Image (cartoon, rainbow, N blue to C red):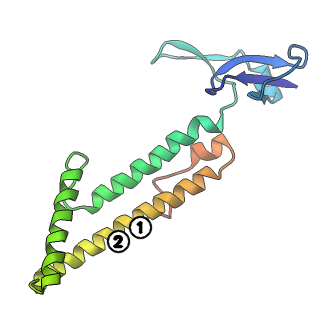
Amino acid sequence: MKYAIYDTAGLFIQYANDATAITLPLNAIVLTEEQWNNRFDIKFDLTINEVVPYSIPKLLSDILPSKIKKVKEEALKRIIATIPGADASSFLIKETNLLARVSELVRKESKGTITSSEITELNGYDAMWSRIKSIRTSSDSIEVEINVLTTYDAVNSYNIEANPLWPV
């Protein structure tokens, strides 16, 4: 058998085969015949000007954290779009102002001094909050879907933005 051996951070260390390895560490991955035959093929990544082997199998653990981060980023983008007038830089200010306004309206409602237009406004905030909760639930479900995938390619090709779990 032929192997690629990685360190504990998932970075490639060396190749080995049955003739060169007496015992293999747990971080050894079996290579296909094609991967073994192409093990010295290289490409140049001009952005960092270093030689990078490209026939080494990609580890699922290399991509999962970044894919989950992208789910969270997509959820945040959708939540920001839910709040009128909010963008990435003003989101927290808008959210704080909305919370203060909702608190104000709830106090007025509890005192019986809320107007019909304020009730309509409060109902709008309730609908907005329901949508935000729905986005968060969808995000959690998408993360679960990604975490049960078993191959690098499946995770890499998973389309977060077009997932039908997102609320319309």
The residue lying furthest to the front in this view is 111
Kindly report the distance in space between the C-alpha atoms of the residues bearing marks 2 and 1.
6 Å
Point 71% across, 15% down: residue:
40
Residue 89 placement (x, y as % from top left): 22, 45
Residue position marked by numbered label 2 in the rendering: 130
Density class for disc 1 (Cα within 10 Å; few <14, some 14-19, many ≥20) is some
What amino acid is at disc 2?
Answer: Ser
Point 16% across, 60% down: residue:
97
Q: Secondary structure at mark 1?
A: helix
Left or right position of 38 against 79: right
Residue 6 placement (x, y as % from top left): 69, 23
Q: Are marks 2 and 1 in contact (CB under 8 Å)?
A: yes
Label annotation for residue 134:
1
Residue 92 placement (x, y as % from top left): 23, 51
Point 48% across, 57% down: residue:
162
> Which quadrant, please, contains the C terminus?
bottom left
- How many marks can you see? 2
Left or right position of 100 against 56: left
What amino acid is at disc 1?
Answer: Ser
Q: Secondary structure at mark 2?
A: helix
Query: In this rendering, is residue 53 above or below 81?
Result: above
Residue 59 placement (x, y as % from top left): 66, 34
